[in-house]
Image (cartoon, grey):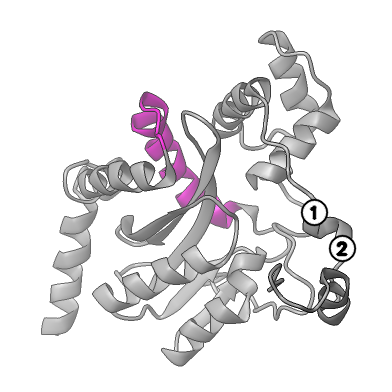
Amino acid sequence: MIDRNSALPIVRQCDALGLCRSALYYQPRPLSEADLRLIRALDELHLQHPFLGARKLAQLLTREGFALGRRHVGTLMRLMGIAPLYRKRRTSLPQKGHKIYPYLLGAVAIERPNQVWSADITYLPMARGFAYLVALLDLASRKVLAFRVSNALSGDFCVEALEEALAKYGPPEIFNTDQGAQFTAEAFTSVLGAKGIRISMDGKGRWIDNVFVERLWRSVKYEHVYLRAYDSPKHAARELKSYFEFYNAGRPHQALAYRMPDEVYFERTNMSKAA
């Protein structure tokens, strides 16, 4: 937006755009190696104990030899985009001005593919630095429908994953997410609305609705992510593509009577079409 080669002074350009000139010259400092090791350990503890907050996580990390306080842990948790799962006023903070949709799954029995989809974002450690992973899940079959990896916690990569899933599998009846800014943004909800999909968002006291995706994150990280060191988001995306193919077509799920998500998804989908 700022053109450094323009004849118009940068001060005038910033004034016209309503930007602070000091922010234009600010160069963010990269995370230290100590913080990168810390957030890796924090990510593992959060997966094991998703109900713990910054205070107790700080105590556990101190026992593991890290010197830090709860404020430092809280700062890193916000950077990673994670929060403890427990009853609280809101499961996630939406962007101001974004529309919040009602929760629709209170009395719904999820019994068939493409009835309810869900999406979530998780932190993704790499050899140096970190990225974010978004995945779309069909709740009835546990099938991962699409995913994207990004080095920024923006909404663009979420919209890309959604459009891919819709192009491949058609629209679901209901799409459920938390109230995160990436999912309440008009760019995301307008895609759902254009397909006639009913939008559902977790509300007060609905922390348990994220359990299905949290289980997916636990499998992804312990079976794949923690066993590798990604060089870049592109490298992570290539490796995760292979893992999700295995997850969908080659990994038995106890909740599915040890069947594969692809088997359940396509069998029931074909039955529905035949009916």
Amino acid type at image mark 2:
Arg
What element does badge 2 sit on?
helix
The picture places residue 129, in percent across and down from the top left corner, at: 55, 35
Of helix, strand and loop, which mostly describes the magenta segment?
Answer: helix
- Taking the spot 15% from the left edge, 82% from the top edge, the residue there is 273
Q: Which residues are magenta?
A: 208-231
Q: Which residue is mark 1?
A: 25
Q: Residues within 10 Å of mark 1 (few under 14, many from 20)?
A: few
Residue 261 % position (x, y): 24, 54
Residue furthest toward the front?
7
The amino acid type, in three-letter code, at marker 1 is Tyr
Residue beneath the point at 46% across and 28% down: 127
Residue 90 pos. (x, y %): 75, 59
Element marked by disc 1: helix
* Quadrant for the N terminus in the image: bottom right
* Magenta residue check for 8: no
**Image quadrant containing the C terminus:** bottom left
Mark 2 and mark 1 residues within 8 Å of each other at the beta carbon:
yes
In this view of the protein, which residue sits in the foreground, 265 or 150?
A: 150
Residue 101, located in which quarter of the rendered image?
bottom right
Residue 196 visible in the picture: yes
Regarding residue 109, the answer to whether it shows in the image is: no
Q: Which residue in the protein does label 2 denote?
A: 21
**Residue 215 got which mark?**
none
Residue pictured at 79% horizontal, 73% vertical = 96
